[in-house]
Amino acid sequence: MPTETILSVSAIHLFGRELEDIRLAARNDGGRPPRLGTNRFIQDQIDAPGSRLARIYAFAFEAQFYELAKPTILVVHGPGTDVDYPPPASTDLKVLDRGPSDPSRTGLASQIGSFARGMSVWVYDKSAFSMRLDVETGPLEDVLLNAELMERDPRVSSSGVLSRSGGSLSRSGGVMSRSGGVIVRGRGDLD
């Protein structure tokens, strides 16, 4: 029977599914200079046995459930644990409508509804290191040109080219503006 511990206070429950089409592979440094320093937190997480990538949809922390606005990919370890306890054996609506019965699986005291089928949970301490991968999809214009060039050059428009009003420098309809055509002169010029 699962129990509560004092360490439950700092636990983060990650809810998601393992990615099937992307795998972490053993590193080959290929003759690169060695990484210096003793901080190898991320490297150790990736090199750990059972490390893999999972799409995370939500997390629980301090008995609160947070659904991500956009799923993200995190490094996790092992296949995770089934969220439902026990997993529903039938499609009986009473079984599917209940929340998980064990708070040590979800970090939640109560829950409305249930998790999607096939959802797993990974539990980490809030101070554990991980790597987050946010994936962008769409036309190259959006995911490459605008994302990179907008940060470097504010003249880049949404079409990915330098913003120059149809190819020519913007000059207020083609005429240089001179304050309504009147040139203000110095004192004594209009006396």
Image (spheres, rainbow, N blue to C red):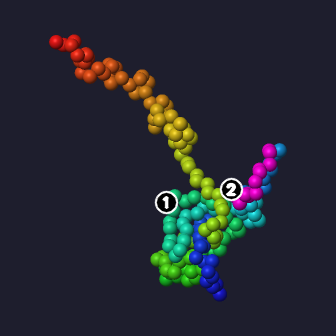
Choose top left, top right, bottom left or bottom right for residue 8.
bottom right
Q: Amino acid at mark 2?
A: Ile
Residue under numbered circle 2: 22
The N terminus, quarter of image: bottom right
Answer left or right for 38 relative to 186.
right
Residue closer to the observer: 19 or 6: 6
Choose top left, top right, bottom left or bottom right for residue 144.
top right
Q: Is residue 11 magenta?
A: no
Answer left or right for 16 relative to 175.
right
Q: Amino acid at mark 1?
A: Ala
Separation (CA) of disc 1 from disc 2: 22 Å
What is the magenta range? 32-43
Residue at (26, 22) in percent of width and height:
179
Residue under numbered circle 1: 69
Residue at (24, 21) in percent of width and height:
180
Residue extending farthest bottom: 1
